[in-house]
Amino acid sequence: MLDYSDRLVFIRRSLGDYQSSKDGNVYFKCFNCGSGPDKKKLVLKLETELWHCWSCDVKGRSVFSLLKKVSHPAAQEWSRRFSDKGRTKFEDDTPKEEIVELPPCVPIEDLATSKDPDAIAILEYLQGRNVSIKKAIRYRLLGGLAGKARRRVIFPSYDSDGCLNYWTGRSIDKSSMRYLNPPVDRKSIVFNEIDIDWSKEITLVEGPFDLLSAGENCIPLLGSTIPRDCLLLKRICENKTPVLLALDSDAITKSHAAAKTLYGLGIEVRMLDLNGAKDIDEIGYEAFKELSKTARHWYPESRLNHIISRIYSGSLV
C-alpha cells in the first residue's frame, strides 16, 4: 500500500473533513449535491484516484479533476506536487504501452542550487534561450541528469484531469536526436490540455519552446501538421474553438493546409505572418503578443493567393 499521508493532508485541507473505510477509501461531503455533514456520499479511491458521489452520481478519474471542481488553485498545486507520483491505473483501463512515465529528471528550480555540471549547463542553456526560472516553473519544466534524458530540458504534458500523458526532452547539445519522446502516439494526446481554455482562441505552434514565447492558451503540435484523426482536432471541433495558426516560416504551405482543414470543419482561423522571423521562439513573448494582433482571418482565397504567389516567384506548387 502506498503512503498517502501527505496527499490526505492536502486533500483534507482542500475538501474538508473525511471519513475513512476499511477498504482504504475516503468519504467527503459532496461539493455538487451538498450531502449533509453526517452523510459523506462522495467516495475517493486513493489508489486509483477514481471518485464518485453515490447521491448525485457526479464522478471523475483523478484527484485533479475533483479539486478543479472545488478550487482551481488547489488543483494546480496538486498537479505540481502529486500528479506523477504513485498513480496506479487499472490494466483494463489503460493499455500498458500507453502508460507514460517521466525519465529521470528534477524540477528546473532544484537545479539552481546544484553544483552538478550538467545542471549548470541546462540552466545556462535556458538562459541563452531567454527562459527565466519563473517561466520554467510556470510550465513545469524539468532537467534530465541521468540516462537517455541526461542534458535535456524535459517538457511534461498533462491531460485535462492532471495526469501525465506525454513529455518531450530537448537536448542542450548538438545531437542527431534533438528531441527524445516516449513511445506514445501523439495523435492521442493534446499537449498540456490541463492549461487550455477551449472557450477562448487557442494558438497552435510547432515546438515546445515556441509555447514559452507564445504564452497562455497555446498548444505545440510537436510538428507542423494536424492529422484528421487526432484528439486535438476533435477537441477543437467539439468546442468550436477559434484558432490562431503560428507555425514556422518554412511551414507556410502546411499552415495553409491546416487552415483549410479547420475552415472546412467550421472553425474560425487566423494565420500569423512571422514578419521575417524563423519561428515564434526567435520573436520572443512581447513581440509575439503584439504581432498576433495583426494576424488575418483565413479564407479559401488566402490559400489560392499563396499558390499564385509561389508560381510568380518561380517556386513549385
Image (tube, rainbow, N blue to C red):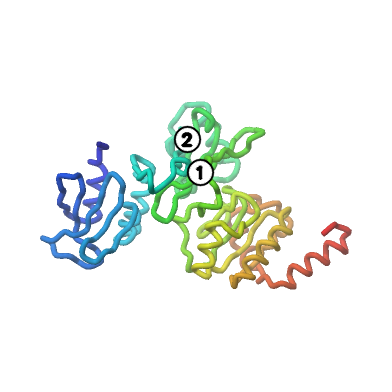
Count the marks. 2
Residue type at mark 1 is Trp
Locate residue 129 relative to residue 132 in the image: left or right. right
Label 1 crowd (10 A; few <14 / some 14-19 / many >=20): many
Q: Residue at x 47, y 35 (%)?
A: 103
Q: Residue furthest left?
A: 38
Q: In the rendering, at what x and y percent does residue 69 appear? A: 32, 61
| Side of 273 where 130 appears, left or right | left
Discs 1, 2 touching: Cβ within 8 Å: yes
Which residue is painted at 64% across and 70% down in the image?
264
Out of 7 and 49, give the one closest to the viewer.
49
- Which quarter shows the N terminus? top left
Task: Name the residue: 51% across, 40% down.
Answer: 154
What is the C-alpha distance between the residues marked 1 and 2?
9 Å
Nearest to N terminus: mark 1 or mark 2: 2
Residue 237 is left or right of residue 48, and the answer is right
Where residue 152 sits, quadrant-wise, is top right
Compared with 143, 78 (above or below) is: below
Q: Quadrant of the C terminus?
A: bottom right
Q: Residues within 10 Å of mark 2 (few under 14, many from 20)?
A: many
Indicate the amino acid at tag 2.
Pro
> Of helix, strand and loop, which one carries label 1?
strand
Picture quadrant where residue 312 is located? bottom right
Query: Farthest residue in the front direction?
Result: 92
Residue 221 location in percent, x, y?
59, 53
**Residue 218 position in % (x across, y down):** 54, 58
**Residue 167 bears which disc, if any?**
1
Question: Is 146 drawn above or below residue 108 in the view shown?
Answer: above
Q: Determine which residue is flagged by label 2.
A: 103
Along the line of sight, which residue is nearer the eye, 109 or 162? 162
